[in-house]
Structures are given as C-alpha cells and as structure tokens.
Image (tube, rainbow, N blue to C red):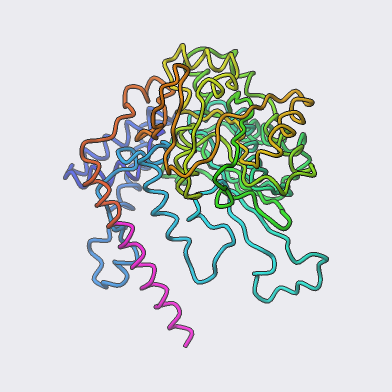
Amino acid sequence: MSDLESLTRRLIKKRYSDSQILERLVQEYLDFKDIDENLAFKLANAILEECRNSNIDCISDPFIKELLEVNKSNVSVGKQGVGCRGAGDFFVHKLVANFSETEHKAFLSPTSLDDAGAVRLQDIKGFKRELFSTKDLIIVSKMEGIHSRLSDYPFICGFHVTRAALRDLYVKGAKPISIMIDVHLGDDADVGKLFDFMAGISVVSELTKVPITAGSTLRIGGDMVIGDRLVGGVAAVGLAKRKLLARRNIKIGDKILMTEGSGGGTITTTAIYSGNHDVVLETMNLKFLEACEIILNSDYIEDIRAMCDVTNGGLRGDLYEINYEAKCGVTIFEDKVQKLVNLNVFELLKKTDVDYLGVSLDALLIYCSERISGRIISDLAKHNIKCAEIGFVDDSKQVSMIYKDKEEKDLLPRFRESAYTKIKQEIGEETPSTIKGMENRVGKSALEALKKREKIFKFIKNQKN
C-alpha cells in the first residue's frame, strides 16, 4: 500500500525538487501497477499538481484556513499507541469521547468507555411514544473496525468483525436487529476480496438470524492510494428493554464470572503470522453469542449488573477500564483465569511469548450477585460453554491478581497490548520516556479541536438568524 498524496506532501515539505518527486512517484506506480512509464509519469504529474494546488499555506482568508487546517499535536498515532489497546490508547479515547458530549445526551455515551452506546426511545424529541406498546425501549449501537492484519484474509476478517460487533450489543443486554458494513479497498485490490469479506459477514448474519441492512463500498483514498489493502468496519444496532448491562451498574461484592476464551481476530492474526494456522479453527465459533442468548433469555437477567468482553488490551486493559467507569476495584485469581483460556490458544501464546493477560481472548465477563453465579455457570455448562468464577468486586480501586503461589500483585495495563506479532514485539510494549510531553501535546490538540468545533457551530447557527 502506498499513499501517494501523503508521500508527495512529505517530499514537498522536505524541499525535494519536482523532478525528484516525480521520479519517486513514477517508481511507486511501476512497483504496484502493470503500466508503462509514460502513463505512470502522467499520473504522477497530476498528483503533484493537485498537492501543490491544495496547499492551504497560500490561503488569505483566516477563517477558511482555520476550517481546513489541522491543530497538530506533533505526536503520531503510532508513537501514542492509538489502536494498540493499552494505556496510550485509553488516554486518547478518553479525549475522543469528549467530542460526543453535546447538548443532546445519549443514555450510554462514549464517555462511559463501555462496549457500545445507547439512546432511550423516550428521550428522542418529537417521537410519539404512544405509537408503541413500551416506553422503555433502548436502542443500542456499535461500530467495530476490522482487524488491520487480516486484510489478506478477507473471509475470516469479515467473520470476526461481525461477530465482534454483535458481541458488544449482547453484553449490554441488547438483541441485535441490524448489521451494516463499511468497506474500503485499495485501488489494486481484486474485486474477489470484497466478495470474500461479505461472505464472512453473511455467515455470522445467517447463523445469528440478524439481517444485513445497509453498507458502503469505496476505494481507500480514491486515486491517491495504490495497493490492495482492505479496511473498514461493521456497525450493528440492537434493542434492549428496561435496563442496560452497563459497567456503571457494578456493585461492591459482585462476583465476576468468565467464559472460555478461544480468541477472535487477534488470536487469528497471531496464529497466521506465526505459522500456526491450525489454531485459526479454534476461533471459528459463536459460543460467546450463544452464552449471551442463554443469559438474556433467563429469569435471572435482572440480577446481572454488567457484562463485558475480554478484548481491549486483554484482562489487563479491560479490568482497568471497567474499574474506571464503575469506580470500584477487583480481585482476580490467576489460576482460575488460566483454566478458561482455550488450551490450544494458550499453547500458541506461550509458544510465541505473548502475555495472555494482555491480549484479546474474546471471553465473556459477567458481573452478578453471588445468589445467581452458580446458576449461570450451570446453565452455560448444559450448552457446552465453560464458565467459572474468577474473582470479585471490592472497593480498592485497583486490579489485584492473586497468583498460584498466593502472591498478590497489581495488574496494570501496559502502554500497548501484548505484542502478539513479530513486528509488534520489535516495537515493544514499554511506555515511552517522553510520555508526559506527548500527553500534554495531544491534550492541547484535542482542546484546540473542541474550540474549533464551537467556532464553526456558532458560524453555521448564526447563518439561520
């Protein structure tokens, strides 16, 4: 994949001559496309012309310039660990969530850092509730991005992203009713990739009886990006009644149950890129969704406080985020957790030197009262779904892990999730020494964007008067 527009802008900034830039772009074209040098030169020249014409430095109107300009933090998403599901990622997402705070509040907003978001039907202005038999209907929504390393394996990519989107609805107590797809392919991607991706999605749709209702298919960057990468995501909508199984419902004294984790997109990626392809089959199931169906259809659903999935940075990351929202602490027993990791997946992680506590396992966490914990475990066992109690909620505001030798340690998220591929291991999981300065710059950039939002909001609003 080559982003020719970004490459050209970078070379212009480095003061490369036009001839040097054109030579580089022509080579990129010849590397990716089966075209002659004359056509490659014409295309390269068009890109260079567009990049120079779109340079905002020459704009005289300060308002237009501000509208088009980015308030840069001078910290790249890679250095900050964005998308890497660790402490660096959590920091940025707390800032991103601030942009969802508008006058019209969601019932469960991104600021909760929960698995999905929700609005209540009764809170929608102008909606005639009397047309419906229930006023306590809650609309739950989720957007799930595909696993970036599964671009070359579109069927399994589509399968796992769809399963993940539905999973995040289920854990909030919602029944999925709609699947929507957004997929972007590089200019040189084979059209067959699109069909394979859709086939993976439709397998989950068929098995769960949740229809595909809408979608969008585009090229990445239009004519400005060449290569065959596939990116995008799946959105899903669900309905819940009366209550959400949100993290904010968790109470001190609750028991924490966990189902068997056999992995999803992350474990699939680890298996493929370490050459252990047979482990991919361990991830091809819907046990997580089946467990949620059993629980949602039970007579003890009211005694369940919250459900979550072990994904974002593994147990290290998820428990940290859950505590933050629930304003509580937890004590977890490591030996009970380990027994719930699929044996083949556990052996894969051990073989590839990946910390299983810091990687996505796709296990279900259930926070419930002690009174029903045994019934949940028993009901799931009847459907061949392993589940056990792994700990409890306390008021420590910490995540404490008790190991097999009875030693107790705090379980903290690392800057990035466990490095589950060779390239991630080369980059490392350690917190950069410059983290404080990076966070200050990123925070300032977010604040400037909020100010810009307010300014543009007032400009458009005043046009109505």
| Magenta-highlighted residues | 445-465
- Horizontal and vertical percent for residue 16? 18, 42
- Horizontal and vertical percent for residue 182? 58, 46
User: Who's the residue at 56% across and 22% down the image?
Assistant: 336
Which of 386 and 377 lies nearest the eye of the viewer? 377
In the image, is residue 447 part of the stretch drawn in magenta?
Answer: yes
Q: Is residue 228 visible?
A: no
User: Who's the residue at 70% across and 46% down the image?
Assistant: 303
In the image, is residue 197 part of the stretch drawn in magenta?
Answer: no
- Horizontal and vertical percent for residue 220? 48, 43
Which of 418 and 217 lies nearest the eye of the viewer? 418
Q: Is residue 55 above or below residue 121?
A: above
User: Residue 144 appears in which quarter of the rendering?
Assistant: top right
User: Who's the residue at 30% across and 43% down the image?
Assistant: 76
Q: Is residue 269 visible?
A: yes
Q: Is residue 133 above or below residue 179?
A: below
Which of 144 and 93 lies nearest the eye of the viewer? 93
- Horizontal and vertical percent for residue 315? 49, 32
Single out the residue that lies furthest toward the bottom.
465
User: Is 435 positioned to the left or the right of 218 in the image?
Assistant: left
User: Who's the residue at 57% across and 31% down the image?
Assistant: 190
Magenta stretch, overall SS: helix
- Count how many numbered circles sit on residues in the image: 0
Quadrant occupied by the N terminus = top left
Which of 19 and 134 lies nearest the eye of the viewer? 134
